[in-house]
Amino acid sequence: MTIAIDRALYRAPSLDTPARVVESTPPRLVLPGVGSGDWGLRNERELGFFGEPVDGPAFLAELERSGLRGRGGAGFPAHRKWATVAAAAGPKVVVANGHEGEPASLKDTWLLTRRPHLVLDGLLLAAAVVGADDALVYASHPEAVAAVERAIGEIRSAGLVPENVRLRVHLAEDTYVAGEESAVCQSINGFPAKPTSKPPRPYQQGVNGLPTLVSNVETLAHAAWIHVHGATEFASVGSGSSKGTALFTLTGACSSPGVYEMSLGRPVLDLATAGTMAGTMTGMLIGGWFGGILTGDHSALHCCYDAVRAAGSGLGCAAVTVLGPDDDIIEIAGELSAWFRQESAMQCGICVSGTNAIARAFRQVLSGSHDPAHRHNLMRWGTTTPGRGACGFADGAFTLARTAGAELARREENSSKGVLP
Ligand SMILES: Cc1cc2nc3c(=O)[nH]c(=O)nc-3n(C[C@H](O)[C@H](O)[C@H](O)COP(=O)(O)O)c2cc1C
Ligand code: SF4
């Protein structure tokens, strides 16, 4: 059977949908009432951004105190990456990663089109702190590229780009893996945007072979916010090791999908309520298509790095798709597995064979095969193979195999007990 992989259910919402703030969250990146047209250089300067001189070591200490973790997917502590690149000798490069290959996520494109100056402020701040004279915005969405180029023109005319900094946009390829940091550097270096084996990592040897800080655009926007408001204020919301607010992209069985700013550590229910979830939650995709499928009602799950990992998934880029009674988890798993097979960069044996085998197993199950070997294999691949590709992509497929395999096991058990699905 052919599996379609284009459901509106878990695709990112339209860019025209206004971003919102979840109740009880202090608005930081999404300012209610401030539309894209109103948010320009003048407003940002009035809010205190741009042009503030920066003391590099003092800001690194502030970044550490803030507890900011990267919003690109891995949640790595921002200050550790910044400090490593700052400590390297010689010329360096900084890259704002706004590629957003994750199909269920919109927050980076929203930031680049609606708050481009804020991202540029964070990027120039990073350049000053680590001592880079080459700064790039890496993006693929045409509206994002146009908005950033316009904003660069504005800040250049206003004399806000330091003379020693070469500030530019690099157009990314429209594939999922093009957003992985070594693929980002490959693309900027003029090669196909495919991940490379590590070491070296970009902070050791990236763009033009130089130490390169690749930071997600949302991480940079928070860094700019911290520069103005301070670490204490930043960390005044959040929980445990997940500080500050984050931009979530909500999709699925809710009547108001879109980008929402929410304090980390709040339950999924807060987000789902803001998005007007329809009916009971029967499952959830969290961290985008990368985090597998959690079955059942997870509205009480706290949206922080540790709790989501403990639930068997990952917060990733904070894309959340709530599933309702009309959504068949195995059908969705089949679609996502076909997408994983299609998007693999086909470089690592484990990724090529793994994504193929997972997609085939789901295809057979969806074609009516009740052979328990499919479930057994999916669980085995999902638990024994993670961490073996050159990039983390294959792990997304293995997480899907493990989580949807558990759902198959549940169905088999119910059917052996005569319980209706
Ligand atoms: C397959 C794959 C795709 C990725 N795609 C993106 C992406 O589109 N945007 C992004 O910011 N990070 C992406 N990442 C994470 C980056 O490799 C990198 O960790 C991130 O840009 C660093 O930013 P941060 O430290 O601010 O989170 C991806 C990672 C993997 C393994
Ligand atoms: S794990 Fe997959 S996507 Fe990543 S480098 Fe290897 S083949 Fe490419």
Image (tube, helix red, strand yellow):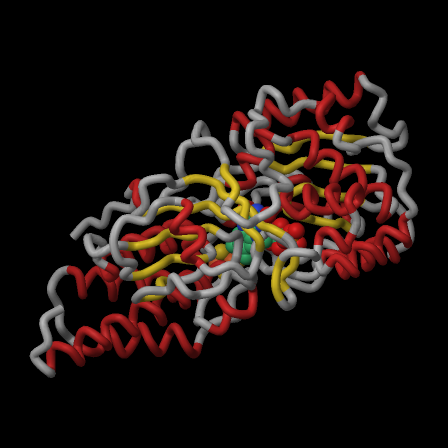
Query: Dividing the picture into quarters, in which one does residue 374 lie?
Result: bottom left
**The C terminus lies in which quarter of the figure?**
bottom left
Q: Is residue 163 above or below residue 178?
A: above
Q: Is residue 40 above or below residue 100?
A: above
Q: Is residue 204 visible?
A: no
Number of numbered discs overlaid on the protein picture: 0
Q: Is residue 53 left or right of residue 417?
A: right
**In the depicted view, which residue is nearer to us: 26 or 260?**
26
Q: Position of residue 111 (x, y in %)?
A: 59, 36
Query: Dividing the picture into quarters, in which one does residue 9 lie?
Result: top left
Q: Residue furthest left?
A: 418
Q: Residue furthest bottom?
A: 417
Q: Is residue 365 left or right of residue 347?
A: left
**In the depicted view, which residue is nearer to us: 368 or 210?**
368
Query: Dividing the picture into quarters, in which one does residue 162 lie?
Result: top right
Q: Which residue is rendered at x = 82% and y = 55% of the image?
A: 62
Q: Position of residue 316 (x, y in %)?
A: 52, 57
Q: Position of residue 161 (x, y in %)?
A: 83, 27
Q: Position of residue 376 (x, y in %)?
A: 27, 79
Q: Residue furthest top?
A: 157
Q: Is residue 253 visible?
A: yes
**In the depicted view, which residue is nearer to us: 107 or 47?**
47
Q: Which residue is rendered at x = 90% and y = 37% of the image?
A: 53
Q: Which residue is rendered at x = 71% and y = 42% of the image?
A: 95
Q: Is residue 296 left or right of residue 310?
A: left
